[in-house]
Image: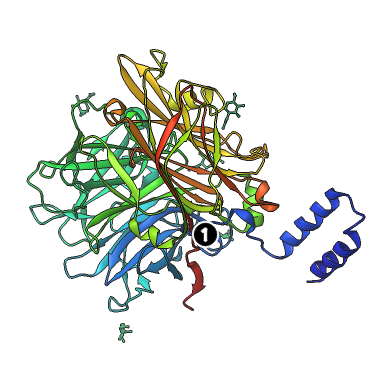
Amino acid sequence: MAGLRLAAAAFHLCLLLCPSSSLRRLYDDEAESTPRHGGFRTAYHFQPAKNWQNDPNGPMYHGGKYHFFYQYNPHGATWGTGNLSWGHSVSADLVSWTALHTALDPDSPFDANGCWSGSATILPDGRPAVLYTGIDAAGNQVQNVAFPKNASDPLLREWVKPGYNPVIPLPGDVEHDSFRDPSTAWRGRDGLWRVAVAAKLDASVGSTLIYRSKDFLRWERNAAPLYESPAAGMVECPDLFPVAEPGHQNGLDYAPSNGAARHVLKLSVMATLQDYYVVGWYDDAADTFAPAAGADNDSRTWRRLDYGHVYASKSFFDARKNRRVLWGWANESDPEADYVARGWSGVQTVPRKVWLDRDGKQLLQWPIEEIETLRKKRVQLLGTKVNAGGVNEIIGVAGSQADVEVVFEIPALEGAENLEPNGLLDPQKLCGEKGASVPGGVGPFGLLVLASGDLHEHTSVFFRVFKHDGKYKVLMCADLTRSTTRVDVYKPPYGGFVDMDIQKTRSISLRTLIDHSVVESFGGGGRTCITARTYPMHVEMSNSHLYMFNNGTGSVKVSKLEAWELATATVNVAHDG
Ligand SMILES: *[C@@H]1O[C@H](CO)[C@@H](O)[C@H](O)[C@H]1NC(C)=O
Ligand SMILES: *[C@@H]1O[C@H](CO)[C@@H](O)[C@H](O)[C@H]1NC(C)=O
Ligand SMILES: *[C@@H]1O[C@H](CO)[C@@H](O)[C@H](O)[C@H]1NC(C)=O
Ligand SMILES: *[C@@H]1O[C@H](CO)[C@@H](O)[C@H](O)[C@H]1NC(C)=O
Ligand SMILES: *[C@@H]1O[C@H](CO)[C@@H](O)[C@H](O)[C@H]1NC(C)=O
């Protein structure tokens, strides 16, 4: 208090006389006494009111409400000692959220050192259950179950952990700190429950184990793992889910299958801190999963769920809208001291609807339609052009909180650059070598977002078409290298190829959600997603701008551009007390 008043008085004295560095200092002092959210707090991404969050946990639709849980440190903005709780929020629409008390806290012998990640399962009688990893008093990882104290409470406020936990103790052949993240459970044709748990076996093999149960209490390990990827090492947060026929957008809940159901297996690989998925076949008799023909067993070679900054994703079946919805954690990229000063760390991606593309090989991901309820001011451009070397500003929407959809038409592909023989191997590296400022043939063209008026700071999200082996390849990049003048934040170029036939479509779409420190982009209708965290400095002094640009040799047609300013969602501002 005293400090605040002093600072305010000093500020008046200083106004005309002080060098800018002491003004800066004053600002910092104020920041210390009043937790300042600054320009980086998001407006419509999921965040708790304060403190640290990481993995999404146990998302579910139950009794007309969505429940979302998350790894949460109630004591501060760092992961801390890792003795985490489960944060808990409820929503009617996946956009506005009300914060409840923590659902699980590390206060039992079987989770004394942390209630780690897990998933929710709706039991046949409609009662939800969660399976989660406890770090027990001895520091071992074990799997526990918890139930709502009162299943009729519409908010499921209190959760109880039966004394018979852990339901799955640490097996003898699994390393004590590498046994975690139970998936949503499902039932097979034999009526038995199954759950997948990630485990590193003593022989150092990263594995996903299957446990079976008659009653959800006594679980027995299946001799065969669901899946093993020895080269990839320890994996986390396995997510196995059925998908409808290629091109069908409806989601599927788990159902006893005929042994030939197309599934997606998503694994989070510790060694790279990236999420990968593959489409394949789940055999519900053997409880094994085989990637579709042509896919390698090493999960690091699978498709990336997001080519940016997303980890530990988890999906659930949304019975309200008959779709599968996925969340992922995007951590901070600035120094710990900065987010400690801000008082919070970590955001969730916007909930994404996911379904199988017509090609049967890749997922399409798209922000759930409810996000569109936040759209207010709109600007639209039809049939414009961005000339070679051009930069066109999109005027009329606030550039820090926006949703932009654009369709680029490519009149001619002939000018595309040649891709070197090994150019497909490392798209991120390619985005580094061929950034927005490196003129190309067809592209680079795309958006400049969170840009200062002088373009000194900007994040570029763009495409570049290459010729390769008689075909055309589309590279998508989100380049952070010029996103901020700060040098102490992680600001790489991110990149992935877009698996599409550009020769046939002659056009490519881009949707980018901008939310202060988040730039979440969906290329080619959601085939390639890139989520980035950015910390531009200009936002302290001025507005952010939005541009289209083209640094290719030919002009690019913009058949349609729509940009909306987005309203601020009510996310965990109120506590239900
Ligand atoms: C849990 O975290 C709190 C706050 O960081 C710390 O004081 C406490 O010692 C931790 N407990 C354990 C068991 O690590
Ligand atoms: C359970 O919740 C319902 C609905 O809120 C309430 O009517 C009932 O009294 C609660 N039961 C107990 C034992 O608290
Ligand atoms: C993948 O692993 C399975 C099971 O170990 C094996 O049968 C199969 O041959 C492997 N496939 C490839 C492409 O290595
Ligand atoms: C978190 O961010 C840092 C950059 O600051 C990055 O190097 C790291 O891999 C990220 N961790 C996860 C789990 O995404
Ligand atoms: C386009 O290329 C020119 C020349 O390299 C560069 O000066 C300009 O900054 C580039 N535009 C963008 C948006 O990077």
Query: In x, y percent, where is residue 107?
Result: 45, 66
Residue drawn at x 10%, y 41% is 260
Residue drawn at x 34%, y 27% is 231
Q: Quadrant of ligand 5?
A: top right
Task: Please give left or right for residue 449 compared with residue 86 in the image.
Answer: right
Is residue 79 visible in the rendered image? The answer is no
Task: Please give left or right for residue 425 compared with residue 296 in the image.
Answer: right
Beta carbon of the mark 1 residue lies under 8 A of ligand 4 = no
Query: In x, y percent, where is residue 88?
Result: 42, 66
Query: In x, y percent, where is residue 360?
Result: 20, 36
Query: In x, y percent, where is residue 115?
Result: 42, 58
**SS class of the residue under badge 1?**
loop
Residue bearing mark 1: 43
Amino acid type at circle 1 is Ala
Of all residues, the one furthest to the front in this rendering is 383
Q: Is residue 282 above or below residue 427?
A: below
